[in-house]
Image (cartoon, grey):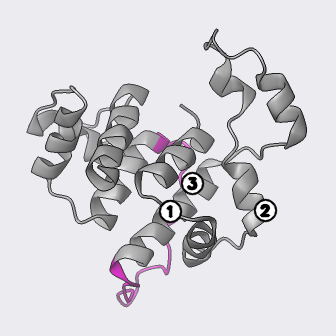
Amino acid sequence: MDNNDILIRLRYALNLRDKEMVEIFKLGGTELTEEIVRKLLIKSKETYRYNDEVDDHDEIEDKEENIKCKNSTLESFLDGFIIFKRGKQDSKPGQPERPVLKNSENPNNTLLKKLKIALSLTSEDMIDILKETGVIVTKGELSALLRKEGHKNYKECGDKYARNFLKGLAKKYRG
């Protein structure tokens, strides 16, 4: 699952409009127009790579070109979403305004962490959301997914968890 797919699924699950997306990106420190946001929300050819049912995706992509969403752009959106939902937090003295972005960290882990913060979810809430989609995860496994990279108990979040978490959010917020 690429970053564009994550944005598309998030937008659907949380029922966000283009104007809200632009505002969220702005809160996260990235200035984008509605047109650019729309291009970020177009599925790439790689997304269809394993789907045999879709034959006309080449024609669709020729009409509008998509823009590949970088890790930093996705993280900017997630940071902005936290501010959008919870408000701006004052930085403590001696603490940098914004942490340095890590390109090496798995975007799926970052997604889970930041959505947990933005939506004020508890671990039990996250387990229930995953359970809605048929994925059973223990509190210990979830804790490993939410740990900082480099921690001895850190576990990389696979696409299965991220995809099903976004699917569960859609069920929770859209009905």
Q: Given the image, on which type of amino acid does mark 1 rest?
A: Leu
For label 1, the residue is 16
* Mark sitting on residue 35: 2
Q: Is 94 inside the magenta-drawn segment?
A: yes
Residue 74, labelled with which disc? 3
Task: Tell me which segment is drawn in magenta.
Answer: 86-107
Q: Position of residue 17 (x, y in %)?
A: 56, 65
Which SS does the magenta portion mostly show? loop
Instruction: Kindly tell me whether residue 69 is visible in this rendering.
Output: yes
x 50%, y 74%: residue: 98
Mark 3 and mark 1 residues within 8 Å of each other at the beta carbon? no
Report the residue at 55% width, 49% height from top.
Answer: 7
Residue 156 shows in this picture? no
Answer above or below: position of 120 versus 41: below
Judged by depth in the image, the label closer to the viewer, 3 or 1, is 1
Other residues around mark 2 within 10 Å, as few (<14) / some (14–19) / many (≥20)? few
> Is disc 3 placed on a helix, strand or loop?
helix
For badge 3, the amino acid type reads Leu
Asked if residue 146 is among those painted magenta in the image, a careful observer would answer no
What type is the residue that disc 2 sits on? Glu
Name the spot of residue 6 as percent of width and height, x first.
Answer: 52, 43
* Residue 28 at x, y percent in the picture: 55, 72
**In terms of image quadrants, where is residue 127?**
top left
The tag earlier along the polypeptide, 3 or 1, is 1
State the CA–CA distance, disc 3 to disc 2. 17 Å
Q: Residue furthest front?
A: 175
